[in-house]
Image: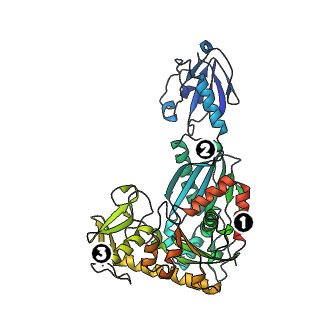
Amino acid sequence: MGCIYYEKNVLEYNDSEHKNLLEIFKDNDIPVDGIVKVHIVSGNSLENGTVKSVSDKDVSVERFIPIGEISCNNAIKKDSTDILSLLYNSLKEEEEKTIGVAVDIGTASVVCYICNLTTKEIITIKSEKNPLAYMGDMTTDELVAHLNSKDKSEFQTALVETLYKIIVSGCREYGVYEKDITTILVSGSTLMEHLICAVDATSMFDEKHIPQSLFGIEELAASLGINLKVSLKCYISPCASYNIGGDIIAGMTYCNIDKSDKNSLYLDIGTETGIVLKRKDRYYSTAATTPAFDGVGISCGMIAESGAVHDAVVKDGEMRFSTVYEVVAEGVCGIGMVNIAAEAIKAGKLTSKGELTDGEIRINENVALTQADFDKLFEQKKRIHSAILSLLEKAEIEMDEIDEIILSGGLGVKFNASNVCKIGAIPAILQDRIRSVLGNASGLGSVKTLVGGLTEFDRMIELSEKFV
């Protein structure tokens, strides 16, 4: 007799009746799909993830067998009598792992941070293009019509399938069991949180702009269609308004704005740029539609992933471009658009009004930026500039009273503060007060809340309730 340890389950088998793992699983009606690792012990038994003490001569332990090898009818081997302690330690380590997933649903991409909640460390970061990214280029009327034309479950399913794909991929890649995941925290724009929860979002776009929900809730993941395990909890980050979603609240907590006494201006730059002005303990907010800043609507636009041009520099009168992971350019991300525009102005290839002097900016034979691309960028940067001025007026504060400006947005790519001012998105007078955030503040804020537990989640809710 022997036993198999798989996915924290134990199954006994008879050596004389079974020749390989596939037969054992089939005879016991156990689907092999989804099983990551299997441990075999012959002449011993496993109970509750521990190994009984027996003499080496009575024990043989099969090595870890990946799912790909299980399906190849591998015969059970009994050629190892000296790694029982390794198996015990491995099982112990797996029991000590408590896994959580922080999710940032941006308009352009969905990013998952898979974390060890015991050590409070990020295990891996995985992302995919948001299947609903096309919404970022719609007008309000087009978006409302589109939302009304389909069942809410269709949007939820699209997001959940992408989320499930990312989580499973990340877990498999790093040897983590999906069944070890105890908590998921989802942050996104108010629209995206409505869509993943299958809540009607159309009321956000009428004249009152009142969302159906501001969330800040706990759900069972299964109720959202995230079927990783029955008891899995899913927290939806609180929103402050129709244009200030849980992603911005998460980013603000990451930067500790709520713990500072400074007058702060926070910009989460992307498809929909959320702008928050903090004066004393009151928060004023607005938003500007800026898809070009996320690479959306640009002829060669893409998210900030491998092959995306994210930076440029003028050298010897020529523009040199840098891509994510330093591979061949496949397109330009939003931050790349900003940096290219600023350097093109410096090189005399673009006027301060966004007019090209040579017809196009060619990056390689397959990638080029046209006048239409820069028209979109410069039209949208005006929206950010105007939104900032309107917030200052609303809060009755002068520009020179702003102590700091925090820029966030972009998947792992740092904003160049001078370039944001160079193109006119932010008044030049404020340039020396900008501190940019390396990486995705919304995602990192979600991680901070995930590993911090209910105390941090309550902090997000408290912050969301301070908006005027």
Q: Is residue 151 visible?
A: no
Gap between marks 1 and 2 measured at Cα: 28 Å
Q: Is mark 3 on a helix, strand or loop?
A: strand
Instruction: Kindly identify which residue carries mark 3.
Output: 360
Residue 296 falls in image quadrant: bottom left
Q: Which amino acid does label 2 sit on?
A: Glu
Amino acid residing under circle 1: Ile
Name the N-terminal-most of marks 2 and 3: 2
Identify which residue is drawn at 53% across, 42% down: 174
Horizontal and vertical percent for residue 28? 63, 29
Q: Which of 292 and 160 is in front in this view?
A: 292
- Residue to which mark 2 is pinned: 178
Residue 420 in the image: above or below residue 81: below
Q: In the image, is 408 to the left or to the right of 202? A: left
- Ranked by sequence position, the earlier of labels 3 and 1 is 3
* Amino acid type at mark 3: Glu
